[in-house]
Image (cartoon, rainbow, N blue to C red):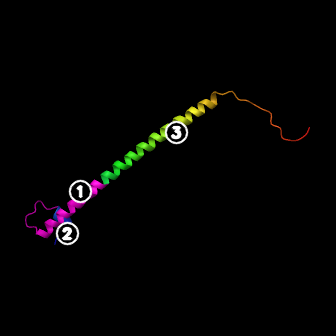
Amino acid sequence: MRKLKDLLSAESYQDMTDEEIDAIIDYKCDLARQTGETTAQRSALEETLTRMQEVDARSRANAEAMFAKACARRPAFRRVDDGEER
């Protein structure tokens, strides 16, 4: 049997044996299955990334709001007693 690379580059199936044609069919079915799996994995990863970005945006907005609130408060300075008698 000829190499799969040579079979795939042929212009037609003419002069190929049944075994060679079956090898091409098997290869193309495997390729389609792998492509489908890769597409499904990519979709799942994109959904996960989108959710992570949404959580990050909410966390960032919350942190910015807390920072703005802290900056808006007047400082309250108090004397700290170090415990030594004077």
Question: Where 71 falls versus 41 (above or below)?
Answer: above
**Residue drawn 52% across the image and 34% down it:** 61
Q: CA distance from mark 3 to mark 2?
A: 56 Å
Question: What is the secondary structure assignment of the residue under circle 1?
Answer: helix
Secondary-structure class at tag 3: helix
Q: Mark 3 belongs to which amino acid?
A: Ser
Q: Residue 81: say if magenta.
A: no
Q: Earlier in the sequence, mark 1 or mark 3?
A: 1
Question: Which residue type does callout 2 highlight?
Answer: Lys
Q: Which residue is mark 1?
A: 32
Between 7 and 45, the one lying in front of the other is 45
Task: State the extent of the magenta-drawn residues as a range.
Answer: 9-37
Badges 1 and 3: C-beta atoms under 8 Å apart? no
Query: Which mark, residue 3?
Result: 2
Identify the image quadrant of residue 71.
top right
Q: Amino acid at mark 1?
A: Ala
Q: Which quadrant is home to the C terminus?
A: top right
